[in-house]
Image (cartoon, rainbow, N blue to C red):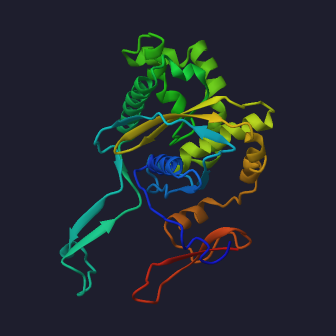
Amino acid sequence: FGERSFKNCDVVDMTFACVGAVDALHNSLDFVRANPTKKAVVIASDYAKYELASSGEYTQGGGAVALLVSANPRLIEVDNNWGVATESVFDFFKPRRHHSKSEFNSALENYPDKIEVFTDEPVFDGQYSNVCYQDRIREAYQHYKEQTFTVRPYEDWRYLIFHLPYAFHGKRVFTEIYSLENHLDFSDAEKQKAIAKSEDYIKFINEKIEKSQRASSEIGNMYTASIFMALLSALQTSFNENEDLTEKEIGFLAYGSGSKSKVFVGKISPEWKSVVEKWNLFDSLKNRLAIDFETYEKLHRKQLDSSVNPDYKGFGLTRVEKDSPVLKGARYYSYQ
């Protein structure tokens, strides 16, 4: 470890909304499968930020998950059958807008005639995005069944792990697949509500989904890291409850706006407990620093020049360059 320790490590940045890290994992698995003596690291990190007072604001969260991929996994072994579904839609995106110089009252003389503005806060249609999510995972799930020649594979999965834009999203969108697999009438809103509230479906949720929601309810939407945090949540809870997951199958239903879904399965390795015992996930969440609403809004508007937690130890932003004309805006990070 140390400075330049990764100088001969190939790196690539992959972006496809909230499914980007799953794409990176997919590529890394193929790389290790072709090069079994090598390893790969997937870092699922994103910028989950919504405009103040918007309908998406309360769902935003922060965090990252890193995965080490090797030919001999100690946590979970991912199968090489993938269901995939895509459709080009505008359910959610971070826009690049163009403005004429005359639109800016205080425009300086050296501004270009056309000004491109990129915003970190997305343009989105929440209800439409939910429909797209539900459509894509249904199509990807069906494709997975065709690839594996399986009938109702979800019944064999110990957990169903979803991308969670908010904690309860997975259990709400899976009602359609559940209905189709069990030949239930899903034709209108009232019937859909009845299925979601049925004793059998609630039992199914409590057994296969609920434990994966717990971390998300504390963190919020991590975008591309969300699905992996759901996995951590489920495994940590099973570990804490002394449940043996060895050889159990985990089903993943990933989604990224734009839109794409991938469905795949992993099998828990015999050594999984030796990995999970180091996480202390929920204890770590208890150690977070609470801030007041005014401080939060200042952070959101980027009005603070110093950290709200000066005692923080770990990897973080050190400074943002303000003076050098060729480096202005460069962000410097360090581990301390």
Q: Nearer the viewer, residue 253 or 176?
A: 253
In the image, residue 167 sits, relative to residue 20, either above or below, namely above
The quadrant holding residue 199 is: top right
In the image, residue 332 sits, relative to residue 288, either above or below, namely below
Q: Residue at x 65, y 60 (%)?
A: 292
Farthest-out residue, bottom: 324
Q: Nearer the viewer, residue 149 or 284?
A: 149
Question: Image check: 221 left or right of 255?
Answer: right
Instruction: List x then y, in percent, for residue 276.
Output: 74, 45
Instruction: List x then y, in percent, for residue 278.
Output: 77, 50
Asked whether the viewer can see residue 222, the reply is: no
In the image, residue 148 sits, relative to residue 211, either above or below, namely above
Quarter of the image with the C terminus in it: bottom right
The quadrant holding residue 167 is: top right
Instruction: List x then y, in percent, for residue 6.
Output: 58, 70
Q: Nearer the viewer, residue 315 or 96?
A: 315
Quarter of the image with the N terminus in it: bottom right
Instruction: List x then y, in percent, for residue 21.
Output: 49, 50
Q: Residue at x 74, y 53 (%)?
A: 284
Asked whether the viewer can see residue 129, the reply is: yes
Q: Nearer the viewer, residue 41 or 103?
A: 41
